[in-house]
Image: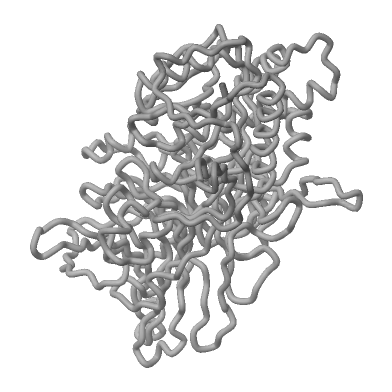
Amino acid sequence: MISNGKSDWMRWTPTREYENLEDSPKNVETDFSDDVQGICHDDEFWYIAHGAGSLNYSNLIGGRNYGVIHQVPLFGLDQNINYTMEKQSKGCLVFSQGKLSEHRFYKYFNPDSKKTVGIKVGEIHFGDIDYYKGFIFVPVFQNGKEGDVDAQILVFSTKTFDCVWCERLKKRDNVYFEKLLWCAVNPLDGCLYTSDTFISRSFEGDHSPVMAYRIDVEKLKMLEKGKNKNRLSDSVFTCVSKDGIILYRGVKNDAGEIEARPYEIDARMQGGCFDSFDTLYLCAGFGSHEKHDGVSAFVLFRDNDESTRDFIQKRAYYIWKEKGGYLQTEDEKRKDWFEASWQINSAVQSGFLRFDGPAYAGLACTKSNGSDESAIDFSFNGQNFLYPEEPEGITYWDLRKYAKEKDCGWLKGSLHILKLKNNGIFILGGIDYFSVHNYVLRNLESPVKGLFYDPNGLHIKFNPITQRWVIVGRDNFPLKEFESEKEAENAKQLMRNFKTILKIGRYAADETKNDYCYDFLDDCVSNSINTNNIEKESCRFKDLKIENETKVPAGEWRSDYAVVMRYNNETVKSLPINCNLDGNKIETIYHKIRAKADRKKKDFYINNLKASSGKIKDNLYWFE
């Protein structure tokens, strides 16, 4: 472990803004709403995991539990599915009391296209599922009736809906999980994350930390093609987090300082997922409320393996060097390490850097620095006798680009949480209802506000993950990303006149035009800036007035705060940002330039690169 880096991030609490949108659909009853358990998606469809017959009278007198997965169209969350069902000649192989046994296996078909649209497995219970590279990963816990089904992961192909693999996971040495209620695959490291029923540092009974397992996708592809593997001795999942991922929450102590304290989830786990920014979301709760039920978001840390430590050490030294440091104090070392660690975490989030090691810790996001309040508002009534509610699966899918195609409330959000309303009057034959709570992640906060670089050491690389062009520094660290090579070349030419990028503000979104990122170039290294060959947009700085606005009108997207520059009462620049502190930084830059202009008695201009793609996050501002 890194004492310096670890102690520093433990002094900081990430704050996030999640806008709570309408519940959509809300309290609907469909042919996949009964005992709904999990949700995930690929690029076209939802996949909904649920039970069948689990809360009806026939089940109480000897009926069977079933685990079911339905493929649901993007616009069809509130609609019944037209399908037929066929029993398969071969059963689904499942571990029961350490041995493989065949369970009844059915497939659902679209009667028109004959395409497979789902599966049903007998005598089993599914948890919250996830999708990754053509496969659905399904956590299974013991059958509620007889308890003879082991906790395990089933893997289904989305091409054929065959179960290509099943495997019992160990949480430590020869100790298997007692129950697997959720799993989530992080696209940034290719690992499957899961836990036992309750999350803590203990490995005893039905407790465990969050654990990570590397997925052998190539082996799964061979299995999909029909190549047999010995399920009793072979493995697709390799544990890469021996001690688990420990969760923390930053809280204020009596001295008013932020300190990280271990965070345990004492409510039953229900779901988990990752977004595109290396954030782990966990959903928990059942029946009576516990202290840590509901939905929590965690920023992950990855700076404990040797290769990552070396990389951070080099970056920290580089930051100090570019700042012009000569004799570095221990406090300066600590601060530079902290800054380097966060810069590297940001690079991992962007997909530019990739580490073999998984996360080793997660720090809970809150609404305000040092608070104990989750950043995500989510409530449920688990004690309603007739219709008890419980949170279930959770998934991240930014759907705002589809919002114009159909009036569906869920198309307005990016984070989607299932809530099950159990039908307590099951003897009368009713089935359950479900709702989807939808949220938008409005900002990504980082304590790092500046990137230092050597103006003479810039070069351009192509990022195959994002299919974009990146300006990197002499130490191969990513500084700024652009849509085209030409735009990156223009920015590089401009950046050679400066040595710092100030990170002003960022709003996080997967959709292109909703990803705001304002970066200002600072610390000019030459008296004249030649921008004749650079396409730019400019406005005269003289007589500009700057003010803060708390309500900013926008078309399809709204921000909560902005800095607005006006000239003769006409808005010249309106910069949506993520917090008041960043607004103050923009004002500081503004007054600094105004003072410089007055001192030199000349006009200054505020400029930004003119990007042909129109991506706002490609903008880079400077003054001349």
Q: For the N terminus, which image quadrant?
A: top right
The foreground one among 619 and 434 is 619
* Colouring scheme applied when the structure was drawn: one colour
Left or right relative to 537: residue 478: right
Q: Residue furthest top?
A: 456
620 is higher (above) or lower (below) than 280: above
Q: Is residue 320 visible?
A: yes
**Which residue is painted at 51% across and 35% down in the image?**
349
Q: Measured from the top left, where is residue 275 in percent x and y?
A: 48, 46
| Residue 341 figure quarter | top right
Q: Quadrant of residue 171?
A: top right
The residue located at (34%, 56%) in the rendering is 101
Asked whether 42 or 111 is in front, the reply is 42
The answer, for residue 119, to whether it is visible in the render is no
Q: Which is nearer the eye, 454 or 308?
A: 454
Q: In this figure, what is the number of numbered marks? A: 0
Residue sitting at x 57%, y 67%: 378
Residue at position x 47%, y 65% in the image: 21
Q: Position of residue 433 (x, y in %)?
A: 40, 78
Which residue lies most toward the bottom here?
428
Q: Quadrant of the C terminus?
A: top right
**In this image, 146 relative to 408: left or right?**
right
Pick out the residue farthest to the right: 255
On the image, the x and y values in percent for residue 242 come to 62, 37
Q: Is residue 360 above or below residue 484?
A: below
In the displayed structure, 295 sits above or below 298; it is below
